[in-house]
Amino acid sequence: MGGQVAMLVREVMSSPVVTVRGADPVRRAVRILHGHDITAAPVVDDAGRLVGVVSELDLLRGEFEPDPRATVTPVPRTDGPPPHQVNEVMTGDVVTVTETTDVTTAVDLMVGKRIKSLPVLRGKEIVGMVSRRDLMAMLARTDDELRAAVEAALREQYPSGPSWDVTVRDGVAELSGPPSEHTGQIAGLLARTVPGVVRVKLLRRSP
């Protein structure tokens, strides 16, 4: 008997989430994104409700305008007031996911909507962000690294056994272990929490 467990957004998202307010000055948002080394952030109102997303590119466009002497190089705005607040440059049409959204669905949204990051909601609360960078970091781990991480997670949960045979190929972890369905479910959940494991297959040994 076997099964497969997909990876969920909560296992790859960045959390706690860094937010900016719609009323924040653009320069303050620039410093926040740069200081946290992130490419985008959810925008919230004074009540903490999600009202948009702002990216590095949005902020750069808000602070620079084309130099009339050149066709490429932008210069800081000097002859007129730039958009002073984040809500003037943010994207208001926000695509979101939940913690239990399948990672494959999140990837499809990013590709289909041509966006680089998605706010993660729990009800109306913003609990994280999942970005292309998060997914790339997850996929960059080697199969050997993933196998070692899965084995360590299983040993921590079951220091006295039962034992599991673990193989990982292209991010897919295959666990062969005792016939207990309950134990197998727990082992599958543990393996799935390892960033970079994109899917888990459970193979139960005969008693």
Image (cartoon, helix red, strand yellow):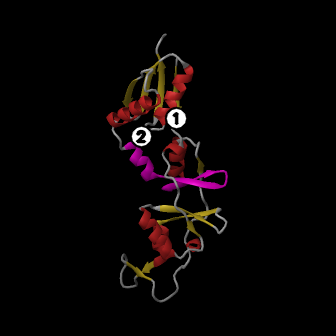
Can you say whether 185 is above or below 118 in the image?
Answer: above
Image spot of residue 124 (x, y percent): 66, 55
Q: Residue placed at 47% from the left, 89% from the top? A: 79
Q: Which segment did they paint magenta? A: 114-139
User: Disc 1 residue type?
Assistant: Ala
Toward the bottom, the furthest residue is 79
Q: Residue placed at 46% from the left, 67% from the top? A: 57
Characterize the local packing of mark 2: few (<14), some (14-19) or many (20 or more) Cα atoms within 10 angstroms.
Answer: many
Relative depth, front residue between 29 and 112: 29
Q: Which mark is residue 128?
A: none
Q: Which mark is residue 6?
A: 1
Q: Is residue 206 magenta?
A: no
Can you say whether 160 is above or below 29 in the image?
Answer: above
Image spot of residue 202 (x, y percent): 48, 24
How far apart are the alpha carbons under marks 1 and 2?
12 Å
Toward the front, the furthest residue is 160
Image spot of residue 41 (x, y percent): 52, 62
Circle 1 sits in a helix, a strand or a loop, which is it?
strand
Rendered image quadrant of residue 74:
bottom left
